[in-house]
Image (cartoon, grey):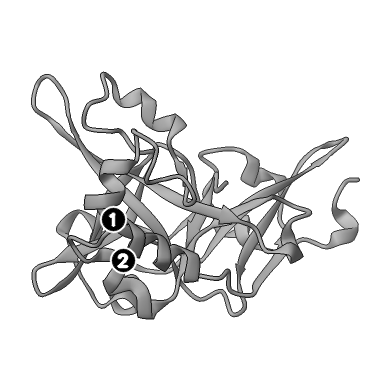
Amino acid sequence: MCGRFSLTVEVDAVASAFRAEVAPPLRHHPPRYNIAPTEDAPIVIAAPGGRRAGLMRWGLVPHWAESPRVGARMINARSETVDRRSAFRESFLARRCLVPADGFYEWESRPSGKQPYWVHLAGSEVFAMAGIWSSWRSRTGSRLLTFSVLTREAPEAIRWLHDRVPVILPPHSWDDWLAQGTASSELQAILGAAEPPELSLHPVARSVNRAGYDEPDCVAAIDPDDVVP
């Protein structure tokens, strides 16, 4: 699964990488080093004439949900079954997005506690996680936009750390993923063809374990000798 991720670049860099127009609420969004479930994060969707980057809350809330609290349990969707799950199917078919990131966190269980690792591409460049989104309205009419990150089986090289990783979509598939009216079989083909790129990882300070701690040192490598067994 993907339980935390980072996007440590400025909004202008996101707009450039995704060739996306930036929605006003996103313009002053700061770099994020430890994005946690139920927090707002930048996403990219299709828009007339191109792509649009905006903010949505992490944790998908289906339009039919009684309460937005269900979103905390729907931060990830398995790519292999997303088209068969009632909570995700409609969004998969009609509302897909790209979730910009430059890394994500996974944890190794140790006798002394959970040791976080920051997983990223070589060079730490921004990449696109496959996502789906939904629009939910409260009884008073207020609108809440939420998203979920699709996951797949982890590459063998990092399976010792976790058996799932986000689906990372290559740039050449972004338009097809966002396009309206694409059949479920074609979408599954896009996901299946998105082989995990070569991933790098290093241990980071356990301050990352605290949701709400969001400082640049979250992604800084620590000396492996300092990692508590």
* Left or right: 62, with 164 as reference point: left
Element type at mark 2: helix
* Left or right: 55, with 219 as reference point: left
Instruction: State the CA–CA distance, disc 1 to disc 2.
Output: 7 Å
Are the residues flagged by discs 1 and 2 in contact, CB closer than 8 Å? Answer: yes
Q: Which mark is residue 177?
A: 2
Number of marks drawn: 2
Amino acid bearing label 1? Arg
Reading the chain from its start, which is encountered first: label 1 or label 2?
1
Relative to 4, does residue 144 appear above or below in the rendering?
above
Q: Quadrant of residue 61?
A: top left
User: Is there any visible trace of residue 133 in the rendered image?
Assistant: no
Task: State the residue lying farthest toward the front.
Answer: 185
- Callout 1 environment at 10 Å: few (<14), some (14 to 19), or many (20+)? many
Measured as percent of width and height from the top left, residue 73 is found at 46, 30
Relative to 37, does residue 184 appear above or below in the rendering?
below
Between 150 and 5, the one nearer to me in the picture:
150
Q: Quadrant of the C terminus?
A: top right
Which residue appears at 28% of the width and 71% of the height?
176
Element type at mark 1: strand
Between 150 and 192, the one nearer to me in the picture:
192
Between 125 and 205, the one nearer to me in the picture:
125
Between 30 and 49, the one nearer to me in the picture:
49
Which residue appears at 52% of the width and 49% of the height?
214
- Callout 2 environment at 10 Å: few (<14), some (14 to 19), or many (20+)? many
Relative to 25, does residue 192 appear above or below in the rendering?
below
Measured as percent of width and height from the top left, residue 177 is found at 31, 66
Which residue appears at 28% of the width and 20% of the height?
67
Amino acid bearing label 2? Trp
The residue that mark 1 highlights is 96
